Image: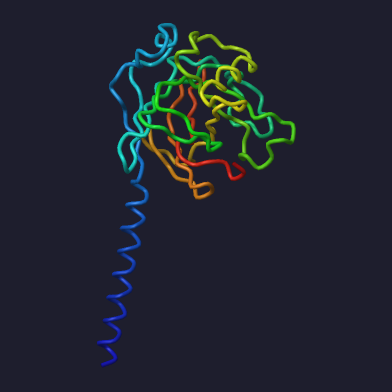
Amino acid sequence: MEAFRTRQWLYAFLLSHSLLLAAGSAFAQSYKAEPLNEAPPNELAAAVRTALSSTGIRVTGPSGPLCDIWLGKAVPGKANAPQTLGVVYPQLAQGTLVSAIRLPTAVKDYRKQLIKPGVYTLRYALLPDNGNHMGVAPQRDFLLASPATDDQDAATVTIDQTLALSRKATGSNHPSVWSLGPPEDHPKSLPSVFHLDEGDQWLVEFQLPLAGSPTTVALVVIGSAPEA
């Protein structure tokens, strides 16, 4: 009788462990990133399309494609930029065109602002270090989304111009912010997607062709700021 109970307990343990593993595996597969053999969309200005890679990245979720991303061919950057507290990617200057993104459906950005379906440019910006954005993110690195119809030039612009362009994506006084985070530590094939529990965030990770210093970058595509 005791042996029978032991077998029952062992069977129940193994079954529950298998279910947990299956659930974890399904959770990990909720989003994925894969190469997209498609040129940048025609909604982008010719100068912007020329500055972007001829192929992209598609991020897919439980309901289908979430977004398509095209990276710059050679994003301007300083190879030996000094490290700054709270900044993960000091190589980038504010206002630099990093990529473009296509949203097939409306999504919420890192600030929980609703962004309409469409094509947008993504330019680098730093969260102001003025105490008004405490707790928004562990780092100050962001990309600001601007409607493709309004952002016509691939050249780096000022931070004020970047903010003005991005406010057109939200129709408010606040730009559309997309958080950049540090990549995962272990090597893997890129592009890829990983999950962070805080904010229930999903990040797409890719190799950004920074001029003189290719760098692995992670962009939050699902999830929001804890203080949003």
In this view of the protein, which residue sits in the foreground, 163 or 181? 163
x, y percent for residue 62: 32, 43
Q: Where does the image place residue 18, in percent across and percent down from the top left?
A: 30, 64
Q: Residue at x 65, y 42 (%)?
A: 135
Residue, x 40% and y 23% (percent of image)? 118
Residue in the picture at 35% in, 62% down: 20
**The C terminus lies in quadrant:** top right
Across and down, in percent, residue 151 comes to: 50, 13
How many circles with numbers are drawn on the protein?
0
Placement of 221 over or under 74, stated as above or below: below
- Res. 137 image quadrant: top right
From the viewer's side, name the closer residue of 101 and 212. Answer: 101
Assign the N terminus to one quadrant of the image.
bottom left
Give residue 183's position: percent from left, percent from top.
50, 36
> Is 13 on the left-hand or right-hand side of 228?
left
User: What residue lies at 52% left-to-right and 31% top-to-bottom?
Assistant: 178
> Which residue is at the far front?
171
Q: Is residue 137 above or below residue 18?
A: above
In front here: 15 or 41? 41
How was the colour assigned to the protein in this rendering? rainbow
The answer to which quarter of the image holds residue 2 is: bottom left
Identity of the residue furthest to the right in this view? 130
- In the displayed orientation, state which residue is furthest to the top: 47
